[in-house]
Amino acid sequence: MTFPLVDIGVNLTNSRFDNDWHATLERATAAGVSHCIITGTSEKGSLDALELCRKLSGDFPAMLSCTVGVHPHEADNCNVETIPFLLDLARENPDLVVAIGETGLDFNRNFSTPAAQEKAFEAQLELAATLGLPLFLHERDAHQRQREILKAWRDHISAAVIHCFTGDRKSLFNYLDLDMHIGVTGWICDERRGLQLQRLVKEIPLQRLMIETDAPYLLPRSLKPKPKNGRNEPAFLPEVLKGIAANRPESEEEIAALTTENAMRFFGLGRSGSEV
């Protein structure tokens, strides 16, 4: 049985999907995925996400939206032209651009300096506040600092989701205390790394939960059979749903209904042509 699902984070502009977009979305539709949000991670990546939405809209009407933003790994490349560029993308395409991000802090790899990350993050917080758009957030090994910055801006931000949450109980409740949503990926299907998330997922209020693949990354390890190319895709979102349901009291159907409703409300889907 399939349930209508929204994949809130898909890296469909990744080269592993090149020229396979139609087949990918056809498989997603067959699996019950009714809407996908393509993640923007840089100036070019955000433009590519938007253009891919436009390119595919004829064959998959109202199935695609996107975010525009600068990932912390790309923060060193965030310059005086970046934020105005993202602002224009969002203002000129309100039917497709549904959030600012992927933004946040990543002190695990520091592909960009912490100072550059914080500067780019705050600039995007201001952008989200200006536009009234929600935030699509990344965070790794930077919880305390990210929380401090978010707390200072929270009254100015309409909504925010911590995408691909893999943190501990303290960080989960700190984000929930800031009235944020939590995105869960196939990490929960990992019998090695996902044990902490399996224990914590029942602590997430259902009205704050959303699901995502983060494709082509984080292929659910519980998936059988696994694709030979090892690529994750939106069609595998039901496996994430299954992993969540195995660790919560509600049924898959209940979780599907509420997470879809949450995503529609959070991203404003169903308005300006972005229907699920």
Image (cartoon, rainbow, N blue to C red):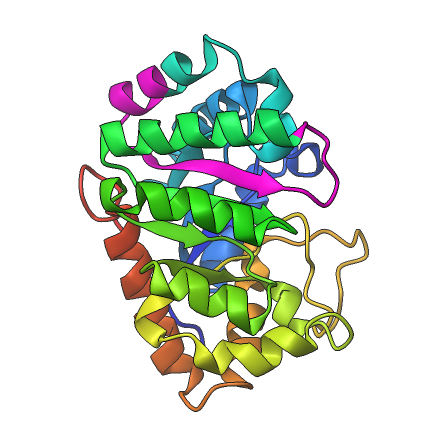
Q: Is residue 133 left or right of residue 249?
A: left
Q: Is residue 266 left or right of residue 173?
A: left
The furthest residue to the top? 81
For residue 226, above or below residue 214: below
In this rendered view, identify the residue nearer to me: 149 or 207: 149
The number of numbered badges drawn on the structure is: 0
Q: Is residue 239 left or right of residue 39?
A: right
For residue 74, above or below residue 31: above
User: Residue drawn 44% across and 63% down?
Assistant: 174
User: Residue drawn 46% across and 29% down?
Assistant: 69
User: Residue drawn 47% across and 82% down?
Assistant: 202
Picture coordinates of residue 25, whole percent (x, y): 51, 47
Picture coordinates of residue 140, whole percent (x, y): 63, 50
In this rendered view, identify the residue nearer to me: 139 or 258: 139
The furthest residue to the left? 271
Picture coordinates of residue 115, whole percent (x, y): 60, 27
* Residue 152 in view in this figure: yes
* Residue 238 in view in this figure: no
Is residue 94 shown in magenta? yes
Q: Is residue 89 left or right of residue 228?
A: left
Is residue 45 shown in magenta? no
For residue 240, above or below residue 246: above
For residue 113, above or below residue 77: below
In this rendered view, identify the residue nearer to me: 83 or 228: 83
The furthest residue to the bottom? 249
- In which quadrant of the rendered image does the N terminus lie? bottom left
Picture coordinates of residue 144, whole percent (x, y): 54, 52
Q: Give the extent of the magenta segment.
A: 87-113
